[in-house]
Amino acid sequence: MLENDPPPFFQAHVFVCCNRRPDGHRRGSCAARGSEALKDYMKARAKELGLKGVRVNTAGCLDRCEFGPAIVVYPDGIWYRAETRDDVDEILSAHLVQGGRATRLMLTEKDVPPPKG
């Protein structure tokens, strides 16, 4: 942030890829892997946990569908893969409640989509 910037409206933004590609697409899609239901659950759980200043949003393609359902938390820029409600709970607890990381679920620099073609 620059000196004269207003304070952030949210402390954390959680983007959940809900991109849907046609069935059989070589890259798959997060929506086909259940991301829409996981996003709805994450939104409800964040509210239940009383997480103030946290916004869970639907995102279009985050370009990592091969590893999805893909989630990214900003401003930290930490990427996760969540396949179950337990995974979502782990991300919320470790990252947004405790301020750490859900290491087991993190996508790293090694998780790079194959070249488009």
Image (cartoon, grey):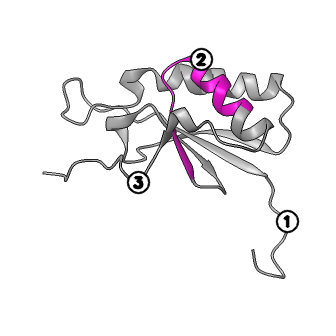
Marks 3/2: CA–CA distance:
25 Å
* Residue farthest to the bottom, as pictured: 3
Question: Could you tell me if the residues under marks 3 and 2 are in contact, i.e. CB atoms within 8 Å?
Answer: no
Marks 3/1: CA–CA distance:
30 Å
Residue at image mark 2? 85
Q: Is residue 16 above or below residue 62?
A: above
Q: Earlier in the sequence, mark 3 or mark 1?
A: 1
Amino acid type, label 3: Glu
Residue at image mark 3? 109
Secondary structure at badge 2 equals helix
Q: Residues within 10 Å of mark 1 (few under 14, many from 20)?
A: few
Please report the residue visible at 37 percent of the width from the left and 44 percent of the height from the top.
64
Residue at image mark 1? 7
On the picture, is 51 further left or further right than 64? Answer: right
For the record, the magenta segment spans 78-93
State the image coordinates of residue 100 (x, y, percent, origin top left): 71, 43
Which of the two discs, 2 and 1, sits closer to the camera?
2
Amino acid type, label 1: Pro
State the image coordinates of residue 110 (x, y, percent, origin top left): 36, 50
Marks 2/1: CA–CA distance:
32 Å
Q: Name the one closer to the observer, 57 or 2.
A: 2
Residue 99 falls in which quadrant of the image? top right
